[in-house]
Amino acid sequence: MILHLSHALAKRLKCKFSFPGDMISQTRRMDSWSADIFRIPRIGSGIIVMHDASLWPIILPLAGCKRYEDFLQALLFHIEASYLSVGGRFDRSNLTVIATKRSNRSIIGSMNEAKFLLGHHVGGMMDASGEVDWAAARDRLAQTPFTAVEGHFPDERFARLAVEEIRGDE
C-alpha cells in the first residue's frame, strides 16, 4: 500500500518517508491513499484520508493519532471496514506500507474541496451533546461528485473498484 502524506501531517506524526528524496507517482492505484490535516474553527482538527482511485473518504480524529504508528493502525482498521462494507477484501495483517509525499495536484485539489465541504457542513452534523457525527460527514463526502473523478460519486466508484479487484484476483 502506498500512503501519500501532506508535509504538515508527516511532520505532526513524525513520519519518515520511505523514499525521502523521491516523489512517488500517484496514478490512482487501488492500493494508494492520500492524507492531510484539516481544521474546523470551534470544532477541532482531524485527518482526512482519500482513496486515490475513487476519492472514498476516511475521517480520523487528530487527537488519537500522536505517532505515525497510531495513525497507521487506525487507518488500516478503517480501510478494512470500508472494503468489508462494500463486499471487498483487505488484509491489514499482511501488508507493506510505503509512506511518501503527496504529488498529484488533482487529488490534492479534491482533498482541499473535501476539507472546505467539511467546514461548511459539519455544523449541521452535530448530535444533541454537541459532538460531530463524523460517520455522517464521511457519508456526505462519499456522495459528493468530485471533479477529479469526472463526476463519479466516491461511494459508487469505491464499491465498483473493490468488487472488480476481487474478480481480478480469482
Image (cartoon, rainbow, N blue to C red):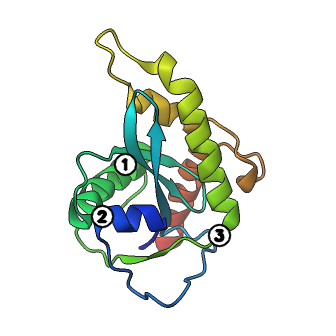
For residue 90, which quarter of the picture? bottom left
Q: Residue at x 64, y 60 (%)?
A: 107
Q: Position of residue 30 (x, y in %)?
A: 53, 67
Residue identified by numbered label 3 = 104
Q: Decide: few, some or many residues near mark 1? Use Cα within 10 Å; few <14, some 14-19, many ≥20.
A: some
For residue 153, which quarter of the picture? top right
At label 1, which amino acid type do we have?
Answer: Leu
| Residue 129 visible to the viewer | yes
Query: Counting residues from the N terminus, which is met first, the one under dot 2 or under dot 1?
Result: 2
Q: Decide: few, some or many residues near mark 3? Use Cα within 10 Å; few <14, some 14-19, many ≥20.
A: some
Task: Using the image as rendered, state which of residue 151 and residue 45 is in the foreground.
Answer: 45
Question: Which quadrant is home to the N terminus?
Answer: bottom left
Q: Is the residue under label 3 in contact with that under label 1 (CB below 8 Å)? A: no
Query: Counting residues from the N terminus, which is met first, the one under dot 1 or under dot 3?
Result: 1
- CA distance separating discs 1 and 3: 27 Å
* Disc 3, SS: loop
Residue identified by numbered label 1 = 84
Q: Position of residue 142 (x, y in %)?
A: 56, 39
Task: Using the image as rendered, state which of residue 90 and residue 33 is in the foreground.
Answer: 33
Above/below status of 7 relative to 119 = below
Above/below status of 31 relative to 44 = below
Q: Position of residue 150 (x, y in %)?
A: 78, 52
- CA distance separating discs 3 and 2: 21 Å
At label 2, which amino acid type do we have?
Answer: Leu
Residue identified by numbered label 2 = 13
